[in-house]
Image (spheres, rainbow, N blue to C red):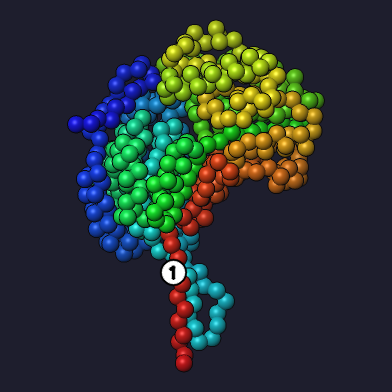
């Protein structure tokens, strides 16, 4: 029997293992999902709302247990993991609350003698392929609106965080009809088979660009909605009028929270020359205060990366940048837990960087950030746009008018002012370029879990 194993980055042990589902299991799951859809899609919206509210409550019943499991599976400190559960609840409840308005029929200007409207209908069976870095926060963006709209959902979790799917199933068993929410533990090849199966009516994937390409290739023979949230290389620009202390505190956290393994984490910072020295000095001093170590210890605020291979990739970016003239301003010896050929990697702050270095253009997804001096807004915008990605961009300034002007010039899905690394459930979460396509969250998120049907009725003839 083929097994899916989760190797914990905490101590390199096998934390859990599960039998891998096979194509026959996918077939059975799809039949069950289709049967459940026939009933669930006809369930009144108010009833779905009540049931999904109970589902969210059930997910939170064991939140401390969930937090410890997440830390073991992917390495985030236990001091931070409860925040993911709080974010899960915030997004889920917001999307439940707005469902009635978001799914309401659209009626154009009335014409006498006609009934004209556009109705939103569920897609059918939706597959949600969730990642390991924020397995609850990313999956909830699609699961809750999909279920509220009347779809049934099949979750395919990352091999690194399979217990999240099991917690979903436990909550569903306590609150939802059978078959409405199911999970499959699949190999990459069998995941492709699920995506391409004619019984799947929509796909939502969060992960790497390569993974997104693989999903697209699996869909070559059919036409269904496909949401792809992929990579990021999110920039920040600190203008001369910024509150430097505030910007430092927030950008250090934006760069190193979750060991930098956040799709909207800060990976490159451009600082106006007038405040560059002050900013760098404050940024380095704050970074040196981090505690790297076993994420199960409450005083630790920087855990291991998810895998040694991921840490080695970031080490390679840092080494290349240093060979090309960059300087690392945080001595790795300050972090004794940082060791070669392990997932434990100290935070790195690089200066004297440029865009010939991979660390300034290629996704790092780790605890490293490059800080580059710029002389004006125009140079900053040009460098912010010099990337294959476009998820978020943040501006640190007291001039909202300048942000309005500059933000429109930056190719990005979200523009922040004086904040970063945050998803507001009332706003559309989307990106451009290799960041992917589609929208989750906000009322617009319901567009991607529904199809429309027009009704054009002549009442008089």
Instruction: Write the residue at 54% across / 27% down.
Output: 364
Q: Residue at x 44, y 46 (%)?
A: 216
* Of residues 299 and 11, the one drawn nearer to the viewer in this rendering: 11
> In the rendered view, would you say 60 is above or below 306?
below
Which residue is at a point 73% across and 34% down the rendered structure image?
Answer: 380
Instruction: State the image coordinates of residue 166 (x, y, percent, origin top left).
Output: 29, 37
Q: How many marks?
A: 1
The residue tagged 1 is: 453
Which of these two is toward me, 335 or 435? 435
The residue at the far left in this view is: 1
Q: Residues within 10 Å of mark 1 (few under 14, many from 20)?
A: few
Is residue 146 visible to the viewer in this orientation of the structure? no
- Which residue sits at x=29%, y=21%? 14
Q: Quadrant of residue 148?
A: bottom left
Q: Is residue 425 visible?
A: yes
The quadrant in which the N terminus is found is top left
Instruction: Name the spot of residue 231 as percent of width and height, x first.
Output: 52, 36
Left or right relative to 189: residue 461: right
Mark 1 residue element? strand
Task: Judge by depth and name the residue closer to the eye, 341 or 250.
Answer: 341
Residue 281: x, y in percent?
Answer: 70, 17
């Amino acid at each position: 029997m083929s097994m899916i194993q989760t190797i914990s980055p905490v101590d390199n042990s096998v934390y859990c293992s599960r039998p891998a589902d096979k194509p026959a299991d996918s077939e059975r799951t799809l039949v069950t999902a289709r049967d459940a859809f026939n009933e669930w899609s006809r369930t009144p919206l108010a009833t779905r709302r009540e049931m999904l509210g109970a589902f969210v409550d059930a997910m939170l019943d064991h939140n401390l247990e969930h937090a410890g499991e997440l830390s073991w599976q992917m390495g985030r400190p236990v001091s931070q993991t409860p925040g993911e559960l709080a974010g899960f609840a915030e997004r889920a409840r917001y999307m439940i609350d707005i469902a009635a308005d978001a799914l309401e029929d659209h009626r154009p200007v009335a014409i006498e003698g006609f009934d004209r409207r556009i109705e939103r209908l569920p897609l059918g069976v939706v597959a949600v392929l969730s990642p390991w870095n924020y397995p609850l926060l990313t999956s909830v963006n699609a699961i809750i609106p999909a279920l509220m709209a009347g779809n049934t959902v099949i979750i395919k979790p990352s091999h690194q965080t399979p217990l999240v799917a099991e917690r979903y199933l436990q909550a569903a068993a306590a609150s939802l009809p059978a078959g409405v929410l199911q999970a499959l533990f699949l190999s990459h090849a069998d995941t492709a088979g699920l995506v391409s199966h004619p019984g799947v009516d929509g796909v939502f994937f969060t992960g790497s660009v390569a993974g997104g390409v693989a999903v697209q290739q699996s869909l070559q023979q059919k036409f269904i909605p496909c949401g792809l949230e992929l990579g990021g290389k999110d920039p920040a620009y600190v203008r001369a009028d910024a509150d430097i202390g505030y910007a430092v505190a927030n950008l250090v956290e934006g760069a190193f929270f979750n060991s930098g393994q956040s799709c909207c984490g800060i990976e490159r910072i451009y600082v106006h020359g007038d405040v560059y020295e002050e900013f760098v000095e404050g940024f380095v001093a704050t970074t040196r205060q981090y505690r790297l170590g076993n994420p199960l210890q409450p005083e630790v605020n920087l855990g291991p990366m998810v895998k040694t291979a991921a840490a080695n990739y970031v080490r390679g970016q840092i080494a290349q940048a240093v060979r090309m003239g960059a300087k690392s301003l945080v001595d790795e010896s300050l972090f004794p837990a940082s060791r070669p050929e392990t997932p434990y990697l100290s935070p790195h702050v690089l200066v004297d960087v440029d865009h010939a270095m991979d660390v300034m253009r290629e996704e790092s997804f780790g605890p490293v950030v490059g800080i580059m001096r710029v002389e004006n807004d125009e140079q900053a915008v040009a460098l912010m746009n010099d990337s294959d990605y476009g998820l978020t961009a943040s501006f640190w300034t007291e001039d909202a008018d300048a942000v309005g002007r500059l933000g429109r010039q930056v190719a990005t899905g979200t523009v922040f002012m004086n904040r970063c690394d945050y998803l507001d459930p009332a706003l559309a979460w989307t990106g451009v370029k290799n960041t992917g396509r589609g929208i989750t969250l906000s009322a617009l998120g319901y567009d991607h879990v529904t199809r429309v049907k027009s009704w054009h009725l002549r009442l008089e003839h």
